[in-house]
């Protein structure tokens, strides 16, 4: 098994190292890092805004670039949270706890330097996991009939909506809305139009770009405009030589890195527990292991390293179900999968065998991209720090232009630009009502395939609903779903006080408006 | 605080009630509209089956969200219940939402340059710290780079400058 993996990986490197692909991987990483640094731009907004740039490309460079944007954005987000105390992306909220105090002590550069190394190690482990686990998962998944696919998707949707953030019930509601939005347009089997209200532009369904940009772009801008506190630039003057960690720092960071890697990879194996939960668990674990837990929050290097490693290892791990089963764990993965579907590629277990260039090229490009990031971040840190100073009043109008032109470029149609405005307004109302829009995209991307498999399963079973519990694998997934719901109900009945407050902020993907309010002590 | 805003505030205080209520309404809408398409049998599902199912589920979830909100909350728990943020930004929200609208109008009838300019300009007007000068400069810069990137480099088929719209 190892030698096939090595041959496949070598093949992946030949794909990823093709000059054309390498260039787009580099561009993705660079742009992702750049936009990720900007305060108020999380990875969801970044990927949605840059998604239209890939329309004209072939599938391989497109997915390499988008993945590059994702982990580039993660590196950028770490800079933003360590130097400014602004977590642009939920997983980095924990990094702020000890990263910012380190910055105040003048050790921000060291924190950044170690983070770069930690992220690389975490990501490398995640990639290795992907190489070995994905083919195994595929082998299992190829045995699945429509009933199994259907219940597996149900499990993914439930996990994605209840474990992510905020109230689980509201998450489920958003998933249902997403599934509904996915059913708008021409019905695949009968060809009849649904919920188009006579608008021929809606025959092909709602545009994924318009949905993503409305919910993560416009709605986000509406909730952040004039709400961002002025940025404190006192500590952002980091130079290259500040970044070099001492031998003692590295020694101190070594075991937290190992622990973070393991926690992150374990979290990525459980569907629905993405990087956010991984980073919080990692911080709590590190605090427990530490001999001086009372010092956490005052600038402990361990408190930065462990969650950052866990985040990166779990992000890479998230690619496993996305690429091998076609079932994304969170909204970011759903967007990447949506981008593949726009390219005309059908996600699912057959993807690795049908498009080995995409899968193995992606795996290899992770390593290349992460190396590029390490190399980039060291000399460019000064420029990134300057970019932190760009005020939001210049950022969001420019981003609005990218939103409009991006949606237009999807189909060269102004109708979709109207769609994005409407969806943005709806998204903001939902945000204010305490809903989090990420599960909408998850449901939207999975919706059509879910419905198709559901119908097929029922057809094969001659309309007998018990098929989902009489087939063993399917019954196992149903059991997991029930377990998941039961846990949620149990937690709710025991009272909200005992649950670790993972995310108190209901207003959007970026809790940066109230950095002080962002979780104080996770899992106590 | 002015009396008018506090009245408004009281009205929108029960956030979960409205959240659940909205879900019930949307669910009802989906289920009713969905059931006008052919439902079919579970074995041969028509186009209406799946959406109707979603609608019904959404109504149930909506009830589950709204119901606890009807019970009066304990003291001190109501701080985060308002729908409106502390400082409503009606003008900024309006500007942001008008931005795509102006992009459509100007883009369609006058081309990409006016469309881009109008889109960025109106969005930038929403910020409290804006000045006319900074807004103008920002819009011009974004227009120059944006049109260069999307029209010349990425070849988005939209006339750069036109009159009356050929689209």
Image (cartoon, coloured by chain):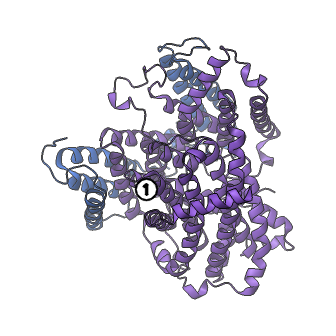
Please tell me which residue lies in front, A191 or A409. A191
Q: Is residue B103 above or below residue B49?
A: below
Residue B92 appears at what percent x and percent y? Answer: 38, 52
At a point 74% along the width and 30% down the height, the residue shown is A474
Q: Is residue A217 above or below residue B11?
A: below
Residue B10 shows in the view: no
Q: Regarding mark 1 in the picture, which secondary structure is present there? A: helix
A134 horizontally vs B124: left or right: right
Please tell me which residue lies in front, A34 or A475. A475
Please tell me which residue lies in front, A202 or B157. B157
Residue A107 lies in what quarter of the image?
bottom right
Residue A168 appears at what percent x and percent y? Answer: 68, 39
Please tell me which residue lies in front, A292 or A234. A292
Q: Is residue A68 above or below residue A403?
A: below
Q: How many marks?
A: 1
B95 horizontally vs A89: left or right: left
Residue A77 lies in what quarter of the image?
bottom right
Task: From the image, tell me which residue sits under label 1.
Answer: A50
Which chain corresponds to the colour blue?
B
Which chain corresponds to the colour purple?
A
Residue A277 appears at what percent x and percent y? Answer: 71, 54
At a point 65% along the width and 70% down the height, the residue shown is A120
- Disc 1 crowd rating (10 Å Cα; few below 14, some 14-19, many 20+) is many
């Amino acid at each position: 098994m190892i030698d096939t993996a090595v041959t496949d990986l070598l093949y992946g490197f030949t794909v990823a190292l093709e000059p054309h692909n390498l260039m787009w991987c580099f561009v993705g990483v660079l742009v992702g890092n750049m936009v990720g640094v900007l305060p108020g731009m999380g990875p969801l907004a970044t990927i949605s805004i840059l998604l239209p740039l890939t329309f004209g490309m072939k599938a391989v460079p497109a997915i390499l670039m988008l993945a590059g944007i994702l982990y580039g954005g993660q590196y950028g987000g770490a800079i933003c949270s360590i130097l400014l105390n602004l977590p642009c992306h939920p997983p980095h909220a924990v990094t702020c706890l000890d990263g910012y105090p380190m910055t105040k002590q003048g050790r921000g550069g060291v924190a950044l330097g170690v983070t770069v190394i930690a992220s690389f190690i975490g990501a490398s482990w995640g990639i290795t996991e992907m190489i070995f686990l994905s083919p195994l998962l595929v082998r299992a998944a190829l045995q699945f009939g429509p009933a199994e696919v259907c219940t597996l998707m149900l499990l993914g949707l439930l996990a994605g909506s209840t474990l992510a953030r905020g109230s689980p019930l509201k998450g489920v509601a958003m998933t249902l809305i997403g599934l509904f939005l996915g059913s708008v347009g021409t019905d695949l089997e009968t060809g009849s139009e649904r919920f188009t209200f006579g608008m021929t532009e809606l025959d092909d369904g709602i545009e994924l770009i318009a949905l993503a940009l409305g919910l993560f772009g416009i709605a986000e801008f509406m909730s952040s405009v004039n709400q961002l506190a002025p940025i404190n630039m006192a500590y952002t003057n980091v130079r290259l030589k500040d970044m070099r960690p001492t031998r003692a720092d590295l020694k101190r960071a070594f075991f937290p890195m190992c622990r973070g890697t393991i926690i992150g990879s374990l979290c990525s194996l459980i569907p629905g527990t993405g990087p956010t939960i991984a980073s919080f668990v990692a911080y709590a674990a590190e605090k427990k292991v530490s001999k001086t837990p009372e010092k956490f929050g005052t600038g402990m290097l361990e408190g930065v390293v462990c969650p950052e490693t866990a985040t990166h290892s779990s992000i890479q791990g998230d690619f496993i179900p996305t690429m091998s089963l076609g079932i994304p764990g969170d909204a970011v993965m759903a967007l990447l999968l949506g981008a593949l579907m726009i390219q005309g590629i059908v996600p699912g277990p057959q993807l690795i065998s049908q498009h080995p260039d995409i899968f193995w090229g992606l795996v290899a490009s992770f390593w290349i991209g992460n190396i590029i990031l390490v190399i980039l971040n060291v000399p460019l840190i000064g420029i990134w720090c300057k970019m932190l100073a760009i005020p939001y009043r210049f950022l969001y109008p420019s981003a609005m232009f990218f939103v409009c032109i991006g949606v237009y470029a999807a189909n060269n149609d102004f109708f979709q630009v109207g769609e994005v405005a409407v969806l943005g307004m709806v998204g903001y109302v939902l945000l204010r009502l305490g809903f989090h829009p990420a599960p909408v995209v998850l449901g939207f991307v999975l919706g059509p395939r879910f419905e198709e498999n559901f119908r097929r399963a029922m057809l094969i079973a001659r309309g007998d609903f018990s098929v989902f519990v009489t087939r063993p694998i399917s019954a196992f997934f149903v059991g997991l779903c029930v377990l998941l719901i039961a846990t949620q109900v149990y937690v709710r009945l025991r009272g909200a006080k005992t649950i670790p407050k993972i995310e108190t902020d209901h207003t959007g993907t970026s809790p940066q408006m109230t950095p002080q309010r962002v979780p104080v002590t996770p899992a106590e | 605080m002015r009396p008018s805003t506090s009245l408004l505030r009281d009205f929108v205080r029960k956030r979960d009630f409205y959240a659940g209520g909205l879900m019930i309404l949307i669910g009802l809408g989906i289920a009713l509209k969905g059931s006008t398409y052919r439902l079919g049998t579970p074995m041969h599902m028509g186009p209406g089956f799946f959406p109707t199912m979603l609608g019904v589920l959404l109504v149930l979830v909506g009830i589950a969200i709204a119901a606890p909100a009807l019970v009066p909350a304990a003291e001190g728990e109501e701080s985060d219940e308002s729908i409106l943020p502390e400082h409503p930004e009606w003008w900024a929200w309006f500007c942001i939402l008008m931005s795509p609208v102006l992009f459509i109008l100007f883009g369609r009838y006058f081309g990409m340059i006016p469309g881009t300019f109008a889109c960025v300009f109106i969005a930038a007007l929403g910020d409290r710290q804006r000045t006319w000068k900074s807004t103008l400069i920002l819009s011009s810069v974004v227009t120059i780079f944006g049109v260069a990137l999307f029209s010349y480099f990425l070849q988005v088929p939209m006339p750069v400058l036109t009159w009356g719209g050929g689209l």
